[in-house]
Amino acid sequence: MKVIPTLATLSFFHSASAFTSMVPKQCHQVSSLSTSLQMGLFDFLNPEEAKKRKEAKEREIEEQIRLQNEIRDRRKNPKKMEEYEAKVRVRRNLRMAGNDEAADMLSAKMYDSEVDAEES
């Protein structure tokens, strides 16, 4: 009778070890070889990263201001507004026809043509 509780206890420990994580030795070797891995957890403390973030934010703000100025200029100029509305009509017709790729290309070019015209 003492054999049954002993077997039950051994089977419990055997099944309990199935839920523990067993990491192969190869993984330990790989991680010990690459000590210069940067995880990015404390990159916000790095002055270079802070400078990059600040520059990216400034570029984004400048782009938004440029686009807002284009919208304002277009609303003031009836000729530009007509051109814009014509492009929107064409884009909407392309979407309704199921030609999404052409509509996306037209959407991408809607503001670029105004910038090119202003620079010329």
Image: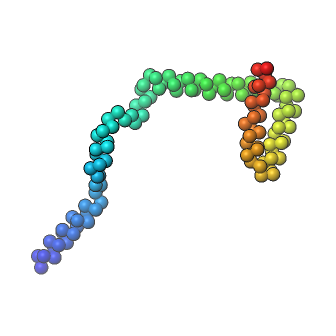
In this rendering, position of residue 90 left or right of residue 30: right
- In the image, residue 80 above or below residue 2: above
- In the image, residue 110 above or below residue 98: above
Q: Position of residue 87 (x, y in %)?
A: 82, 37
Task: Tell me which corner region of the image, top left, top right, bottom left or bottom right, holds residue 91.
Answer: top right
Task: Tell me which corner region of the image, top left, top right, bottom left or bottom right, holds residue 22.
Answer: bottom left
Q: What residue lies at 59% left-to-right and 23% top-to-bottom?
A: 58
Q: Position of residue 18 (x, y in %)?
A: 28, 62
In this rendering, position of residue 9 left or right of residue 100: left
* Residue 15 shows in the view: yes
In this rendering, position of residue 110 left or right of residue 50: right
* Residue 41 shows in the view: no
Q: Position of residue 28 (x, y in %)?
A: 28, 45
Q: What residue lies at 85% left-to-right and 28% top-to-bottom?
A: 80
Residue closest to the far left: 2
Residue closest to the far top: 120
Q: Which colour scheme is used?
A: rainbow
In this rendering, position of residue 61 left or right of residue 44: right
Q: In which quarter of the image is the N terminus?
A: bottom left
- In the image, residue 44 above or below residue 103: above
Count of marks overlaid on the render: 0
Q: Quadrant of the C terminus?
A: top right
Q: Position of residue 65 (x, y in %)?
A: 69, 24
Q: What residue lies at 82% left-to-right and 28% top-to-bottom?
A: 75
Task: Tell me which corner region of the image, top left, top right, bottom left or bottom right, holds residue 32.
Answer: top left
